[in-house]
Amino acid sequence: MKIKVINPNTTTSMTDAIEKAAAACAFPGTEIYAATPEWGPASIECFVDDYLAVPGVIQEIYQGEKDGMDAYVIACFGDPGLQAAKECTQKPVLGIAEAAIAAVKMAAPSFSVISVLERSKKITEDLILQYGAERACRSVRATGLSVLEFERDPEKGRRALHRESKCALERDGAESIVLGCAGFVDFAKELEKDLGIPVIDGVVPAVKFAEAFVGMGLNTSKQNSWGYPEKKELRGFELFRKRQGETK
Amino acid sequence: MKIKVINPNTTTSMTDAIEKAAAACAFPGTEIYAATPEWGPASIECFVDDYLAVPGVIQEIYQGEKDGMDAYVIACFGDPGLQAAKECTQKPVLGIAEAAIAAVKMAAPSFSVISVLERSKKITEDLILQYGAERACRSVRATGLSVLEFERDPEKGRRALHRESKCALERDGAESIVLGCAGFVDFAKELEKDLGIPVIDGVVPAVKFAEAFVGMGLNTSKQNSWGYPEKKELRGFELFRKRQGETK
Amino acid sequence: MKIKVINPNTTTSMTDAIEKAAAACAFPGTEIYAATPEWGPASIECFVDDYLAVPGVIQEIYQGEKDGMDAYVIACFGDPGLQAAKECTQKPVLGIAEAAIAAVKMAAPSFSVISVLERSKKITEDLILQYGAERACRSVRATGLSVLEFERDPEKGRRALHRESKCALERDGAESIVLGCAGFVDFAKELEKDLGIPVIDGVVPAVKFAEAFVGMGLNTSKQNSWGYPEKKELRGFELFRKRQGETK
Amino acid sequence: MKIKVINPNTTTSMTDAIEKAAAACAFPGTEIYAATPEWGPASIECFVDDYLAVPGVIQEIYQGEKDGMDAYVIACFGDPGLQAAKECTQKPVLGIAEAAIAAVKMAAPSFSVISVLERSKKITEDLILQYGAERACRSVRATGLSVLEFERDPEKGRRALHRESKCALERDGAESIVLGCAGFVDFAKELEKDLGIPVIDGVVPAVKFAEAFVGMGLNTSKQNSWGYPEKKELRGFELFRKRQGETK
Amino acid sequence: MKIKVINPNTTTSMTDAIEKAAAACAFPGTEIYAATPEWGPASIECFVDDYLAVPGVIQEIYQGEKDGMDAYVIACFGDPGLQAAKECTQKPVLGIAEAAIAAVKMAAPSFSVISVLERSKKITEDLILQYGAERACRSVRATGLSVLEFERDPEKGRRALHRESKCALERDGAESIVLGCAGFVDFAKELEKDLGIPVIDGVVPAVKFAEAFVGMGLNTSKQNSWGYPEKKELRGFELFRKRQGETK
Amino acid sequence: MKIKVINPNTTTSMTDAIEKAAAACAFPGTEIYAATPEWGPASIECFVDDYLAVPGVIQEIYQGEKDGMDAYVIACFGDPGLQAAKECTQKPVLGIAEAAIAAVKMAAPSFSVISVLERSKKITEDLILQYGAERACRSVRATGLSVLEFERDPEKGRRALHRESKCALERDGAESIVLGCAGFVDFAKELEKDLGIPVIDGVVPAVKFAEAFVGMGLNTSKQNSWGYPEKKELRGFELFRKRQGETK
């Protein structure tokens, strides 16, 4: 089974970390194909970043269809363009926020999300409402560090994650922690050991659920809302069209 | 990996069907252990049935702990005693309604559930609210046939499922169907082909998610609400205590 | 009028306290019959306790039907098996959480519940959502003492209740207090005097509402969801069947 | 115990019918004092009516305080001025919509309300949200007849109530009926017999709950929101002030 | 275009301040007519005040209809009688809470309201739910000062507003402030400068939206719920009827 | 005052119609600048369209900042990229769905939206939830015609709008209609006359609210979530960067 894991930002070192985590958790028969789009911001921390990442994500889905992928993971916690991506294929497409929130609700009665910047919390809060997790979510907290600061100084990042997780646990009553950024994937297991409660990032549950969906033959409904996109003229996306090519 | 699939009712032919479905969808390395409790009703269609199934389910979890199980599935769409079962083990425990609803929300923007009796709909509606799916659920419909009527006359059951699914699709705007009874597991694939939209029962996604949880090492939070049960005197459950034995 | 007040746990000293409180608040023509089930845990503080109490509660309802009871009160704040109990009779059945929450919403614009253990809060939170009181509820707090610790050291219990009620009032903005355990019934009036706001336990409003329901001839709807339980084979509940006898 | 039942409109024949219903359901020791305000509309069917009824209701509460009443019922299904009335006294004050909705939620898993005019439904829908019953309410339907048409031609009213209740039961899935106008009080028992499900008006549960509140000593919280009204100059309510006299 | 701005309380100095603020923000072609009702309380801080202000508000709407007004603003943050006022005219009628909340939701992702007394918060909380802003509202805070204390000691008021706004911003995470009393209108701009986030009172957005509604010809729906009030006998409102005259 | 009205699709005839409608409703001092992005789909009917329109919208906002615009309107009913656009400027930015929903909630107690394709309804439903209008919205209906079919055969479009609006009014109980596509702007007034209830498109209220916001000096909160976008490397948007130039 081939799972394409799309890092919606253009920082290839993050793609590498995501790929490593995905490969580490996959079943033996699963092939992980990590991809970095040609378009998009170096990291995703605000709505502009989130939206500018979407054309690249869509392009990677189209490419994936040509390459015979069996499922897709969008590996940024804002789930950028997730509903658009689901339109582009009948194969399962999982956002890492979507997957992490679905997973944690089955593993714990309540959770908190630790996000990157204060401002990034709104993106997560919107998703929590959209996914019907507003009653299980105790809080969304931020480390105050940008995605790239995390990359540069992982030790500082680790401390900030630990501090906010601790607060979520002790002050907000969270009984599990969701790491709200694909860049946090390496910290989950250590944090879990320190805190004694489940700590999950999104990449791992998204990959595991993708395997599960392929395993059970559960595809995306093409009935109506998420049917293939309407065909129409598209201006100004030369790069996009070049890659998308004959598919559309 | 050992997954114990507990049929909360005492009808062994249903246990067999559930086991077959579970085994058919499992990854090669997964061993399925299906179990029928010694206690409980022959089928589950009302709240009394639902509650009287719980001691048997708990007992099977305790037995599973002794047998070294890696995960548990409670294979009745009422998810009887699910939060109690999660207290009894740190291993993943999945209800089939819980798993089906989590899966379908990722596969389609909306769904309907087809239940057994009219009266059984309330049990499902309560779960849909509890799992935060009230906005994605278009309707809960009933076939009007009991669990055991389904067993006796599968063809009649098939027609009823088809009729209600069609109504859900055409009148209620559902873009996918969830089969709201473990006894419907054999009909999912055929219905899916007929209707052209995803149709999922609960047994299969619960087993696949159980594999996913074990695969990623995601355990049940023992932090607070779902910590191990309080130790205390228990009267009148002789059979229960005999089986539960030294575990508690 | 005969009201059966069922203590779902098997601690008879609690049954006595509940009976005394019920009798003290009843109108002259009301006869209170307090009952302790033969089955069940010594106290109810987690989901396992809650579910294991239900067979005993159902049995007591069946017995009550034979004894010509006019209404039933389930006197544990988790309302264990309440919807199942409502199936077993057309007579009014009131849970003490159900009654307390209904009463307090008419007496105050907001309330907090003081529960026993931290972990027990989830049971109460689930009920608050189910009963549509999530917007009026300011907080659910816990004393950190178990039901039986309360019994052993009432003075310690009194202080803990006072402390948490005070916090609910001053920090959470609660304008009334609901005592979230039948074992707290003796503390309500004293606390009310100390705090200067309504403090209600659940036993008293449940008994008074039971009288009201009988007085106005308001029965439980048997129309559909709460119709009499489906008849079917039941395994392993020898004790249960012995008592339930010819009723079912 | 003295319960003052305030008919917020100025039609004395309705006051008489309400008084009769209240007296018929009261316990022997309960004295019912029905009152018709000097101010207000002849019936209440729109928001203007609802608001213009409030000064008269407040005045009657103040008068009741001088007369030593133990509890108050506001006997119009719009619960006009209910939160204001609760400010004016520490005694229990119950709106008939408030009481009916609280009662029916304990007696049935779902209900529909039958209102008077189509336009009156919005008043009821606002209350259903405010009282946290939006999930249990299947529909609000209207007979299309005004309050006074009901008075003039009760047989036509009876037929309209029957028709809409039947629709609520069969099409909307309601498992009980709430009669959404104090003028419907005489029809409840007959309808209940015809339909085979609980049918409740609001006057009766409000009176019975008032008795229950007095019986258990449960007063209105004066802590904050519903504390006694702020003292201040009031212009233009000559009649109001004359009656209110020294109380304020 | 003629906009009538009704101060629902009878304190003319507040009417003057409201008029000044309304006139200052209006477009050149807009004529502001500020009105003080003959009936009602000197200020509005509790539900009794709120309801007793309504007859005067309705009277002013009727008078406005005779005077050819194009739109109405009800300039008290409790929006007293707003739905009744909307019944009395087809012209736009805007409550200042309604307008402020609609405006702030477009200007900021979250807001807090600063109210007068602690007890007044419930009135605002009810409106926030009714207007569908419960998810965007971070908190409702109170200065603890009455409306008239504000008038008497504006400097003290300014400090209290500043303190609570600061808390809303720093502790509650509000990204904008709504001033929850028409009497605060003079403080908005200064506070906005101090805090660096949008601070809006209600009078200004209500006037601007009234202009917008008139400008686009958007009237109040008379279809059903907010159709003209039912005609019927009205007792005891001599003053009311005298002014309302031939309109009704 | 300069208001830039951005048509997020690349069909200039639609831009012209939008400009005409905007200019027709604006106050004399308002200058309308309509813009068609260089990037994007010819019409917007699915999530892919919606997301691919966003880079062009952002670009137009940046261009508008250089051109000294006072406010922005995004003239597609999916409000594509609205939160991103709000990040890019401190000036007011209004989506036409956002504005129409805010306006209609003040003009009527309930509304329905008429959308283009069945599949487009999900985009609208997501917005209705996000804007807190889920309780006021009676239904989202679709004409079944694409945006460009409307352009080609306006008479067919008119009939379809009429049919669905009529259904919304008569079957769903809507008391006003919102036209869910900028392409419907020419039909609003005629439909309103036919149906006798308020019918609003989104372009007009968005322009009028933009005027109101500028008139009252209400800017977008830059406090946190909607602060200016994070500065970072952006790949593959050559066209985008060329236009955006020195602003970023």
Image: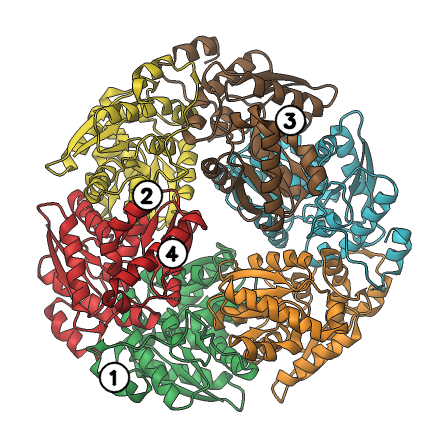
Chain colours: A red, B yellow, C brown, D cyan, E orange, F green
What amino acid type should be assigned to the residue bearing mark 3? Val
Chain identifier of the residue bearing label 3 in the image: C
Both marks 3 and 2 on one chain: no
On the picture, is F6 further left or further right than A95?
A: right
Residue underneath mark 3: C207
| Disc 2 secondary structure class | loop
Residue at x 83%, y 51% (from the top left corner): D59
Task: Give x and y (percent) for residue B56.
Answer: 33, 22
**At label 1, which amino acid type do we have?**
Arg
Q: Residue at label 4?
A: A164
How many angstroms separate mark 3 from mark 2 (CA)?
44 Å
- Label 2 resides on the chain identified as A
Give the mark toward the camera: 4 or 1. Answer: 4
> Residue C5's x, y, as percent?
59, 21
* Image quadrant where residue B122 sits: top left
- Label 3: few (<14), some or many (≥20) within 10 Å? many
**Mark 1 to mark 3 CA distance (whole Å):** 73 Å
Mark closer to the observer (4, 3)? 4
- On screen, residue C214 above or below A5: above
Q: CA distance from mark 4 to mark 2?
A: 15 Å
Using the rendered image, report if marks 1 and 2 lie on a common chain.
Answer: no
Residue highlighted by disc 2:
A196
Q: Quadrant of the C terminus of chain A?
A: bottom left
The amino acid pointed to by label 2 is: Gly
Residues at discs 3 and 2 in contact (Cβ within 8 Å)? no
Q: Viewed as shown, does residue A205 lie left or right of E238?
A: left
Residue, x 14% and y 70% (percent of image)?
A244
- Circle 4: element type: helix
- The chain carrying label 1 is F
Q: Which mark is residue F241?
A: 1
